[in-house]
Amino acid sequence: MRLLPLLERGLRLGLRRSGVATHHVSTPLGRLHVYDAPGTGDGRGGRETIVLLHGISATAAPFAPLIARLRRSAARVIAIDLPGHGFSEPTRVPLTPDRLFDAMTAAIDELASGERISIVGNSLGGLVAVRHAIRRPAGVARLILLSPGGAQTSDAEWQALQASFRITSRREALAFVARVQDRPPLIARLVAHELVGRTRQPAVRDLLETTTPADPIPAAELRGLPMPILLWWGRSERLLPASHLEWWRANLPPHAVVEEPEGIGHCPHLDDPSRVAARISTFS
């Protein structure tokens, strides 16, 4: 019996019981699964909708602890399963970066039309968040990037990153988990072997095969973003190379804030959702 799908279904059930709706939104790549949480809005972001975007081979379900905390200060919190990930439909065509960006723009436009939104993106979700902000700068109130993808990279760095997702054994899976989290909990180690199948899913394979080092975020467009931007790059980041952080430092607009918190790895919402929620709620 596979544990990872059971855990994700359990998280979805727990979210539903706490008042979080789950539904789907149509996009050119098929229907995407969405967690849609009303907030109490009693904090600084009371009139704000927060959109959460996860990374490649992950799902939105592990955002559950973060969703619970962000609901206290936002009007609404949305977490979307990327195309071909989680409870979203399998993609109808091979998943390329451009198709991914088009589908996510369509989903966000449909879900939060006319709303003041902040986008929080982790890893690949960070890249998607930046691309959406470039396309819709007037519609994004804040941009929070957690170890985002999309930096300029060398061929060797990209090949090493691709190789890290070619998981064929439990040993390799455990090594991957150790690179993603600061201190992986027992449950992460128990389900690590299931990453062998997770990283072989068509959407993951398609993205890794169709993304190239020649297609970073356009630096000039990144530097022109007007909204407040926060970049978190944990001191325990072990998946992306340090050169990526330096690229972000060099190419983010001058008003962007870059922080390197201790005890945080590639997926901050897994390491310490309370700290992440608190920082999102206070950042302006």
Image (cartoon, grey):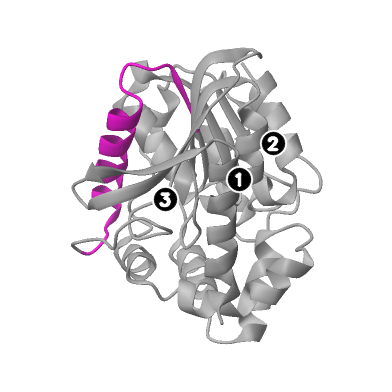
Range shown magenta? 94-119
Left or right, residue 167 beside residue 99: right
Q: Which mark is residue 276?
A: 2
Quarter of the image holding residue 279? top right
Relative to 272, is 97 on the left or the right?
Answer: left
219 on left or right of 231? left
- Residue tagged by mark 3? 81
Q: Tell me: residue 146, above or below residue 284.
A: below
Q: Quadrant of the N terminus?
A: bottom right
Where does residue 242 sit, x and y in percent of width and height? 64, 52
Q: Nearer the viewer, mark 2 or mark 1?
A: 1
Q: Disc number at residue 64?
A: 1
The quarter of the rendered structure image containing the C terminus is top right
* Residue type, mark 3 in image: Asp
Q: Is residue 187 left or right of residue 36?
A: right
Q: Looking at the picture, which amino acid does disc 1 mark?
A: Ala
